[in-house]
Each structure stands twice: as C-alpha cells, then as structure tokens.
Amino acid sequence: MNKRLLSRLMHERVSALQSSAGYFFRGDFEYVLKGVAFEYVPRGLYIWEFRFPLFDFFGPNLLYSTRLSERAGFIGKGEMSEEAIVDFVMSSPEARSAFGSDKSEEVPEFVHFLESAPDLLRNAHARLIHAAALLLVGQESRATSMLDELAPVLNEKDAANCNLLRTSLRQGLAAARTLLDQVRRENLRTLGLAV
C-alpha cells in the first residue's frame, strides 16, 4: 500500500482536506478534528472514523474514533488497489458524515458525542476531556464537579493535567480557556499544523 498515493488520492477527492501522519480531516476545524485515519499494520490497513479534540492533553490519539463498520474497517495487504481503497473509504457512511456536512464538528457536538457513548466515558481520561469540553461550552459548574470527582482516580499524568485545569479554573473561566487553547496550539504543532 503506497501511503503517498493514498494521501494524494484522498486530497483529490475531498476539497479543503488537511492531513497529518495518516489522519485526514476537514480543514474548517476549530477545536475538534473529524475525518478518517489510516492505521498501517504489517497485514494491511485499519481505517477509522477519526475524531480528535485538540484540547486533549495526551496529544493525537484514536480514543474517540471507531473503525469503519464495513469490513470491520480492515483491508488486507494486496486486497485492493489504492484507488479502490479510497473509493471504499469515501463511500462509507462514516466518511460521508465527516466530509459531507456543511460544517466541521464543533465542541457542543463533541460533548453530545461523548455523552451518547457510555462505554467511552468509562475511560477516566475521556471523562477528563469531557470536563474540558464542558468548560469550552460554558458549563463551568458541571465541569468543576466532574474535575473534583475525577482527580483521585486519574493516573499520574492525567491527575497533573486535571489539577492544572482545576487551578486555572479557580482563576476564572478565561484562565481555563487559555490553558485549553495552549493545549490546542501544542497539538496543532505536533500535527504539523502550527498556527
């Protein structure tokens, strides 16, 4: 599977597409990237419906993503040409949803996505990012309660980020948003999309 050819074909098929390291997403984002991701493995290629909140302290990851439903999101090496792979991806309901709407996913839609995914919210890190998203949509008291409940159950790195967010929130919502904007800028740099 030729990664460069797959990338070129994806860019030809989707206008205003941005990409980084196998992630392909709409270019009209603010806080949430949405699109598809190609995960190359020795046996072939996993294809994900990609969603990533740029305010995630961990950095780019697939925690909020799911594999395409058809073929369990997997194409074995040599099963399809690069053109057929891109056709398969672009005809999927997931890609049509990501690239076909008139605007990119915004933070309120991301909050709704999280709240409709109870399995995902069993993950303590996802709950931390849920609280951060609530701050961005102005639900300060709900976010504060969540952060207070989460602090004792998080791993060391997440606990440090949770405490940083709690401390900034004590200085006001603007300070918390400034912290999340800093995380956003760091993630954009990691993805090679520095602003």
Image (cartoon, helix red, strand yellow):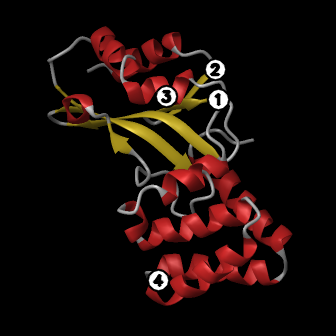
Numbered circle sitting on residue 97: 3
Measuring from the top left, give residue 55's x and y in whole percent. Answer: 63, 57
Q: Is residue 169 left or right of residue 52?
A: right
Residue named by callout 2:
16
Q: Is residue 100 left or right of residue 194?
A: left
Visible residue check, residue 165: no
The secondary structure type at the circle numbered 4 is helix
Numbered circle sitting on residue 27: 1
Give the mark nearest the N terminus, 4 or 1: 1
Estimate the spatial distance between the alpha carbons at disc 1 and disc 3, rounded to whole Å. Answer: 15 Å
137 relative to 105, above or below: below
Give the mark nearest the N terminus, 3 or 2: 2
Crowding at dot 4, Cα within 10 Å, few <14 / some 14-19 / many 20+, comes out as few
User: Residue at left 24%, top 11%?
Assistant: 81
Residue named by callout 4:
156
Instruction: Determine contact: label 4, label 2, CB under 8 Å.
Output: no
Instruction: Determine contact: label 1, label 2, CB under 8 Å.
Output: yes
Estimate the spatial distance between the alpha carbons at disc 3 and disc 2, rounded to whole Å. Answer: 16 Å
The secondary structure type at the circle numbered 1 is loop
The quadrant of the picture occupied by the N terminus is top left
Q: Is residue 97 left or right of residue 55?
A: left
124 relative to 67, above or below: below
Residue type beneath disc 4:
Glu
Measuring from the top left, give residue 164's x and y in whole percent. Answer: 67, 79
The secondary structure type at the circle numbered 3 is helix
Q: Nearer the viewer, mark 1 or mark 3?
A: 3
Estimate the spatial distance between the alpha carbons at disc 1 and disc 2, rounded to whole Å. Answer: 5 Å
